[in-house]
Amino acid sequence: MSSIKIPKPEEMIRINYKPPRTAWMDTPVDFRPGTWSYSGAAKNLIYLDMPNPRAWQPYEEDWKLPANWKEIILEGMRERLDKYRSFRLYLDLCVRCGACADKCHFYIGSGDPKNMPVLRAELLRSVYRRYFTESGKRFGRLAGARDLTVDVLKEWFYYFYQCTECRRCSVYCPYGIDQAEITIMGRELLNLVGCNINWVIEPVANCFRTGNHLGIQPGGVKDMLEFLAEDIEERTGVRVDVPINKKGADVLFIAPSGDYFADPGTYTCMGYMMLFHEIGLNYTFSTYASEGGNFGLFTSHEMVKRLNNKIYAEAKRLGVKWILGGECGHMWRAIHEYMDTMNGPADFLAEPVSPITGTLFENARSTKMVHIAEFTADLIRNGKLKLDPTRNDHLRITFHDSCNPARGMGIFEEPRYIIRNSVRNFYEMPEDTIREKTLCCGGGAGLGNDENIEMRMRGGMPRAMAVKHVREKHGVNRLACMCAIDRSTLTSLMEYWVPGVTVTGVHELLANALVIKGEKKRTTDLRGDPFKEKTDDEAL
Ligand code: SF4
Ligand code: SF4
């Protein structure tokens, strides 16, 4: 947890929903410690050939903007209004019905009206009106328009980096206005004058420099996977292969790098490796494409395209048939919503067919990339895995739908199907907090850093309260999810709001239950925690 002091949970929960006395246009932004993220370091901007690299921090008076910063932003806005019809529509369409107002976890957790999605969009919409609409040009503030000033730019920075692009608000909007798209545009415009955060820019630079967002060199990836194979052998007595950069493999497997390097993701990675060993999948990891997460989504459309392209370039180089993707969040949003028109269709790859069950994954016909939850659910449905769910009896599970796989691709039932076949104690959180209405972890879109810790805990509070509900009602002690950012940010969120609940990936639960051919008598789960003793009936 961060060294920045934040209120204790019992104070944090007392949220002041009273709006400020001043009108929103007259209420300046306050860069309070714990509520914003450090600026992008100059070395990373230089590496990515991005504009205005310099030393600066958001709390400073002088942001060292280029002299013509205003022209740059307005020209950037004009270009994007011409290029993206959706952008213009989202700015024109809103009728201010307020249906989205109380749906954002950052508003619920902070009480700050500018965290209402409708007002967050208005920060940009007001500038659009002033420079690009007749009414705004003529009537100014009366028409909801305002000049673009340095203070407005600072406000954009503060609030567009307090939106996790989770899209919960858009589920409730009668016009389907996608606030995440507005936030992406806001961030793109800020990037034009060098205003971005390091927790986004450094991962992007690292993905190009070493292959993954953590900046681990290829040798480090190899060592870590071999280390995980040793751990698997210790727990199960079975040695699994670690195929890396293997030309001619059937399948290229891409996972978020958090699964190779950081607990609890490493247990999920062990789960993938055990599953592939058991079914004899001819697959390979890659050190060049050693990151599934697409940090471009938090930067610009151009960066989404460049990072997505790395995966497909590697698939071509290795000569695989198709791609299998792990439990990642934004990788799937990029694949499902953008890939086809940005880099696809991937006609040089084969239509994905499971070599074990013969199932054709029709929804991946164009992208040629299959979600591991669909792949594994299909194996279970076809009776290809032997599972002993009693091995997870020491766990009482609930499932968090990660925003991107849930709202970005609609994958709701497959993870639940795997969990129900792998554990015996599974409890859903309340209906209005799961599936397409799921609540964000509070740390997505590059906001999962330490300096932003207060906003993370505030933004994650609604999710944490739903977990607390099932903990109190059913004794839940582990929260499952299918996203590496979630596995990291939910861990600190639980420590803060719901101590006693730890976090897991779905394939960790599967691997605990998976009976592997030739395994020794297993007495512990992948973490080394002992299985619960079986009753006499169960032992029979
Ligand atoms: S964080 Fe999510 S709910 Fe809040 S404004 Fe952004 S997209 Fe909407
Ligand atoms: S729900 Fe849609 S139309 Fe209504 S205020 Fe929000 S963005 Fe505007």
Image: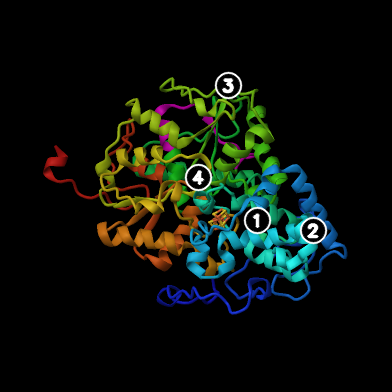
Please, what secondary structure does the residue beneath circle 2 have? helix
The quarter of the displayed image where residue 308 is located: top right
Residue 200: numbered disc: 1
Quick one: label 4 or label 1, which is nearer the N terminus?
Answer: 1
The residue where tag 3 is placed is 350
Q: What residue type is labelled 3?
A: Ala
The quarter of the displayed image where residue 191 is located: bottom right
The structure's colour scheme is rainbow
Question: What are the residue bounds of the magenta stretch?
Answer: 273-290
Name the foreground residue: 516 vs 102: 102
Residue 82 percent location from the top left of the image: 77, 44
Quick one: label 3 or label 4, which is nearer the N terminus?
Answer: 3
**Residue 367 visible from this viewpoint:** yes
The residue where tag 4 is placed is 407
Name the foreground residue: 297 vs 527: 297
Q: Could you give the CA–CA distance between mark 4 and mark 1, rounded to whole angstroms?
A: 22 Å
Residue 84 percent location from the top left of the image: 71, 43
Q: Which amino acid does label 4 sit on?
A: Arg
Q: In this view, does 531 lie above or below 21?
A: above
Residue at image position (47%, 44%) is: 406
Q: Is residue 186 above or below residue 461?
A: above
Residue at image position (59%, 39%) is: 337
Quadrant observed for ligand 2 in the rendered image: bottom right
Q: In this view, does 165 lie above or below 67?
A: above
Residue at image position (32%, 61%) is: 469
Query: Residue 278 in magenta?
Result: yes
The residue where tag 2 is placed is 131
Q: Could you give the CA–CA distance between mark 3 and mark 4, rounded to whole angstroms?
A: 27 Å
Q: Which amino acid does label 1 sit on?
A: Val
Quick one: label 3 or label 1, which is nearer the N terminus?
Answer: 1
